[in-house]
Amino acid sequence: MSQFRGAFVAIVTPFIDGQLDEQGLKDLIEFHIANGTHGIVPCGTTGESATMSHAEHHRVVELTIKAVNGRVPVLAGTGSNSTSETIELTRHAKEAGADGALIITPYYNKPSQEGLFQHFKAVAAAVDIPIIMYNVPSRTSINMLPATVARCAEIKNIVGIKEATADLNQISEVIRLCPADFAVMSGDDFTSMPTVMIGGTGVISVTSNVRPKEMAAMMDAALAGDVARAKELHYQLFPLMQAMFIDTNPVPAKTALAMMGKIKSAAPRLPLYPMNDGSVEKLKKVLGDCGML
């Protein structure tokens, strides 16, 4: 059975005055583990990896692995739009002791399907670590098609995919074409429950940042086939899932965590910018309605 099951949090990276808040990150990790999060994903999109130097990226991965201390799997974001840079970041994650690497399809360059296959093949050949691919066309302008995913799934250490197309048609086709033990994780909170219902293994979640216990419970229920409980939790969490995207991720998640007193500063790094007052009020209302403030 895959270790990449359940609700993995795409954890935010707390910054104070633009610098990594190391204690803040450790405290967040403890909050997640205490609330039953199934796995931690540092340096993903939600962790603002695109604005980190390599030294910072390495530090966040090392710090996360040390703080987690084997209690749950750590799936380190190591993707880039350069294959050589992806290999370097993935190699570091393996050396640091990560349980797996989450690797985004190269953004901006717009490779062909063959280029995508060769990219993942090269990384898998260079670093012997379990790899979860990450398909998020809204961020990368490239969609990795199910047939390409299936080709990659034949490579021994490519063990799954984070599917953030929000398209259950495509997700179904990926599940149909790939081996039974290939982990298909939702990359969109609102499709996480239906993804598991059609054969997926879980979610890499933004909403888990602020509601770890309930997201984990929803995934546990869905994986156990308890449809009624999973559906109940899905609709309980649904307004919050929507609120996490009223501005560019991770700005709402960081703002919510600051409101909840879980991080000292909500500030993202430029070019991301704090939410306007209207959006902050909307977010505050949802959090208040959910009894989170």
Image (tube, rainbow, N blue to C red):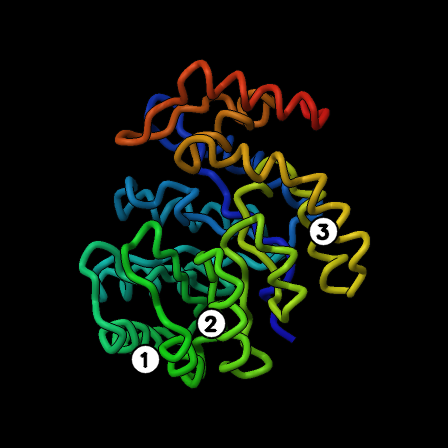
Q: Residue at x 39, y 46 (%)?
A: 45
Q: Quadrant of the C terminus?
A: top right
Number of residues whose C-alpha sits closer than 10 Å to that of mark 1, classed few (under 14), some (14–19) or many (20 or more): few
User: Marks 1 and 3: which is nearer the front?
Assistant: 3
Residue that lies at the very extreme toward the front in this rendered image: 169
Q: Which residue is mark 3?
A: 218
Question: Which is more N-terminal, label 3 or label 1?
Answer: 1
Residue lying at 39% horizontally and 24% vertically, measured from the top left: 267
Q: CA distance from mark 2 to mark 1?
A: 11 Å
Q: Kindly indicate the quadrant of the structure image that contains residue 48.
A: top left
Callout in the foreground (3, 2) = 3
The kind of residue tagged 2 is: Pro
Mark 1 near mark 3, Cβ–Cβ under 8 Å?
no
Three-letter amino acid code at the position of disc 3: Met
- Counting from the top left corner in percent of width and height, residue 62 is at 43, 50
Query: Is 112 above or below relative to 193?
Result: below
Give percent across and percent down for residue 220.
74, 57
* Relative vertical location of residue 196 with respect to residue 34 in this rendering, above or below: below
Position in image of residue 125 (x %, y %):
32, 80
Left or right: 280 with respect to 115?
Answer: right
Residue 181, by quadrant, is bottom right
Q: Residues within 10 Å of mark 2 (few under 14, many from 20)?
A: many
* Circle 3 SS class: helix
Q: Which quarter of the image is occupied by the N terminus?
A: bottom right
Secondary structure state at the residue bearing disc 1: helix
Q: Secondary structure at mark 2?
A: loop
Q: Identify the residue under disc 1.
A: 125
Q: Position of residue 35 (x, y in %)?
A: 71, 42
Question: Identity of the amino acid at label 1?
Answer: Ala
Q: Are marks 3 and 2 in contact (CB under 8 Å)?
A: no
Residue 120 against residue 141 in the figure, above or below: below
Mark 2 lies on residue: 130
